[in-house]
Image: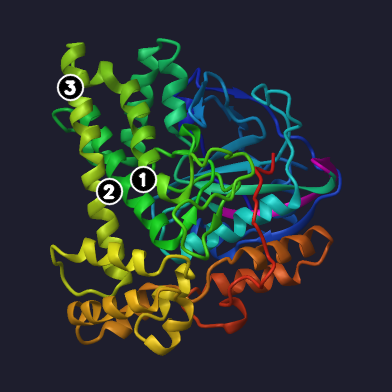
Amino acid sequence: MTIAFDHSYARDLPGTYLRVDPDRATAPKLLVLNRALAGDLGLSLTDAEAEAWFSGASLPPGADPIAQAYAGHQFGGFSPQLGDGRAHLLGEILAPDGRRFDLQLKGSGKTPFSRGGDGKAAVGPMLREVLISEFMAAMGVPTTRALAVVATGEEVWRETKLPGAVLARTAASHLRVGTFQFFAARGDQAQVKALADYAIARHYPDLAGADQPYLAFLDAVIARQSRLIADWMGLGFIHGVMNTDNMAISGETIDYGPCAFMEGYAPGTVFSSIDHQGRYAYANQPLILGWNLARLAETLIPLLDPEPDRAVEIANDRLTAIAPRYRADWTAVMRRKLGLPGEDPGDGALADDLLTAMDGADWTLTFRRLADPAALRPLIDDVARMDAWLPRWLARAGDGAAQRVAKANPAVIPRNHQVEEALAAATNGDMAPFHALLAAIRQPFSAVEAYMLPAPTGFGPYVTYCGT
């Protein structure tokens, strides 16, 4: 088949990227092809085409590989030049429904932005991105998607020798907060404006005719990101590297590196091996939401008002409103998880009090078992507190609560011990556990007991790595 690529980013935003070809894989082997996603994109790929095109062994006709430039605050420190150090954007695909998607290879070799890295990726981290992003998609959380993973036949060195792989990733775009920071840091306001115009046209076309389109753009990004982080929190998801270069302007979850799902509820949970201070701990993610959006707002100051002081005042008004907006989004998520009909002013406090009562209990199972106190009680340490909370919840939830809870809360998540078992097997050439786990998490509301159990005693403390 042929892929009808478009290249609006390269065409409309000269100076924001460098052209560079991916490395050619020496002995590619297709490990995963997401046929459902390919169908949504209007692609009827053969295994041979996916194996060659998504490994770098050959380029699909019409591809125009580029590495995008961006900067970013990483753990609070600003790096003025990051960019795609191991990724190549092949181009954009227009799906049959009219939506536009980037098609990017990740782990496909060095670029001028590699900063001393080898540009490669290992099988395990690329397959992790498949598992986590497919679960997010199944739960309706905005996310980039994995189209394919192809083993390259090469070896990469991290702490040990590992089999190499390339991920083919689709995204609404790869525009990041860090993309704006790259040019703002250089004083290139013309390019910042061009980026904002492009982002509005691609992601927020309804804003093009607004009286203040750049302020409306900032508002729209804030709204999408607030809803996204609320969705993460509802699932117990910890991204691990909420740097500004990992915050997508589209509002999608992007860059699944040292990410994982919290099992026992503990607000300070951190999984990333490099997050020594807990900056990106579970409970800090809403705070980092506001911090990252402040960095975006800084880049847009000259576009918000010709008078600098007035522009800063406008931006600060928006940033001050993030916390209550997030609280409302989080309460809406918790309202669904608790099976509450309608809205009540006390719903947020009801959710807060549940979190106090469930301290240490398995996040996913607690919500799943709410309507069955006999099954819930063994999960809870402070049974008296939970017994005092349950009648309040029952009085508020009313009839049909059990059915609503079951529809809102997954039975199966990518539990950390099962993810690690699947990735270890795949690294050693056995893909069967991976495919079994992938099938289970794509149906997260189906109660498959083998995939519902918490980690066995002795597992942990769990640590994840960037995979770079």
Residue most toward the bottom? 374
Identify the image's colour scheme: rainbow, by chain, secondary structure or one colour: rainbow
Q: How many C-alpha atoms fall within 10 Å of the one at disc 2: few (<14), some, or many (≥20)?
A: many
From what the image shows, is residue 244 above or below residue 340?
above
Chain-order first, disc 2 or disc 1? 1
**C-alpha separation, residue under disc 2 versus residue under disc 3:** 21 Å
Checking the image for residue 286, the label placed there is 1
* Cβ atoms at labels 2 and 1 below 8 Å apart: yes
Judging by the rendered image, the residue that carries numbered circle 2 is 326
- Determine the residue positioned at 42% across, 82% down: 376
Indicate the quadrant containing the N terminus: top left, top right, bottom left or bottom right.
Answer: bottom right
Local crowd at mark 3 within 10 Å, few (<14), some, or many (≥20)?
Answer: some
Amino acid at pointer 1:
Pro
Residue 351 or residue 166, whichever sits in front: 351
Q: SS for tag 1?
A: helix
Which one is in front, 177 or 466? 466
Mark closer to the chain start, 2 or 3 = 3
Q: Earlier in the sequence, mark 1 or mark 3?
A: 1
Residue 308 shows which numbered tag?
Answer: none
Label 3, on which residue? 313
Q: Is residue 10 visible?
A: no
Q: Nearer the viewer, residue 264 or 412?
A: 264
> Residue 4: horizontal and vertical position, in percent?
54, 45
Q: Which segment is the magenta one?
A: 146-159
Residue 31: quadrant of the picture: bottom right
Badge 2 element: helix
Image x and y of residue 451, in percent: 60, 76
